[in-house]
Amino acid sequence: MTESVVSGAPQGMPVPETIGKRGWLLAHADDNLILAHRLGEWISKAPELELDIALGNIGLDHLGVARSLYQHLGEEEGKSEDEYAMGRTDREFRNMLLVEQPNGDFAHTVVRQFFFDCYQLQLWPDLAGSEDEVVAGIATRANKEAAYHYRFSHGWMLRLGDGTDESHDRAQVALDDLWRFTDEMFEGEASGYRQAWEALVGEMLAEAGLSRPEDPYQKTGGRIGYHTEHLGYLLAEMQWMQRTFPGLEW
């Protein structure tokens, strides 16, 4: 693995390998919640109506997974899913940095989704074998959804990479911009996913005529609460109602 950089993290902070079962379930829930919000930002703004619906539906799938994991965690900790989603600061979120990155153009959204889909295709089969029956059930359902998400993002990666000169260039720029956030996927319990993930990505890059970025710099820190500036803005938008009216119930 290339060297990772946790910007500004003080010495003594927990590393991903030691955050424990609860920490990882919370991280997976946060991944899906934050990505769901990002995809929801495309509603009424996607290039085509069909894409508008598809991105919205994928976002709802991710939101459903997040809710299920929050509910399961809440049963042990006496918290509601709203408390997890709406009552924490950016330092308390454990999502990977990739999912909080802005949508950018459509190519950036597709590349971000493709990277994450390849990761979840490794994650959910692994968690489906969990001794925790609730987690196993959530993972089994999520794995079916992840297969659909992968077909969508993989198809668009090929269309963009092997399309016009402009679509190819936009896809390559997105790859170059987002590659620095991929190492974080393989920290802690996910360390064994790298080989399969790289095989899926490498196969697609070859088929689409895209180049693997060579920049060795990798940025991490999300799993221990150190995020890019983008998460703060996202949470300000997502949480404003609960922050304005604490304890609000739907």
Image: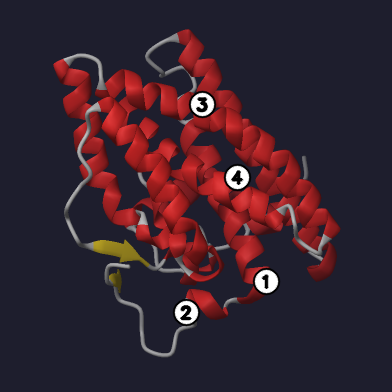
- Tell me how far mark 3 sits from mark 4, CA to CA: 35 Å
- Asked whether residue 80 appears in the rendered view, the answer is no
Q: Residues within 10 Å of mark 3 (few under 14, many from 20)?
A: few
Say whether residue 71 is left or right of residue 1: right
Q: Residue at x 70, y 52 (%)?
A: 82
From the viewer's side, name the closer residue of 234 and 34.
34
- Tell me how far mark 3 sits from mark 1, CA to CA: 30 Å
For numbered disc 3, what is the local secondary structure? helix
- Asked whether residue 173 appears in the rendered view, the answer is yes
Q: Nearer the viewer, mark 3 or mark 2?
A: 3
- The tag on residue 4 is none
Q: Which amino acid, by three-letter code, is at mark 2? A: Val
- Tell me how far mark 4 sits from mark 2, CA to CA: 33 Å
- The tag on residue 15 is 2
Where in the figure is residue 222, as x and y percent of width and height? 44, 64
| Residue on which the image places disc 3 | 151
Say whether residue 120 is left or right of residue 248: left
Say whether residue 141 is left or right of residue 173: right
- The tag on residue 21 is 1
Labelled pair 2, 1 in contact (Cβ < 8 Å): no
> Which comes sooner in the sequence, label 2 or label 1?
2
Q: How many marks?
A: 4
- Tell me how far mark 2 sits from mark 1, CA to CA: 13 Å
For numbered disc 2, what is the local secondary structure? loop
Labelled pair 3, 2 in contact (Cβ < 8 Å): no
Q: Residue at x 44, y 49 (%)?
A: 197
| Residue on which the image places disc 4 | 241
- Tell me how far mark 1 sits from mark 4, CA to CA: 31 Å
Where in the figure is residue 227, as x and y percent of width and height? 39, 62
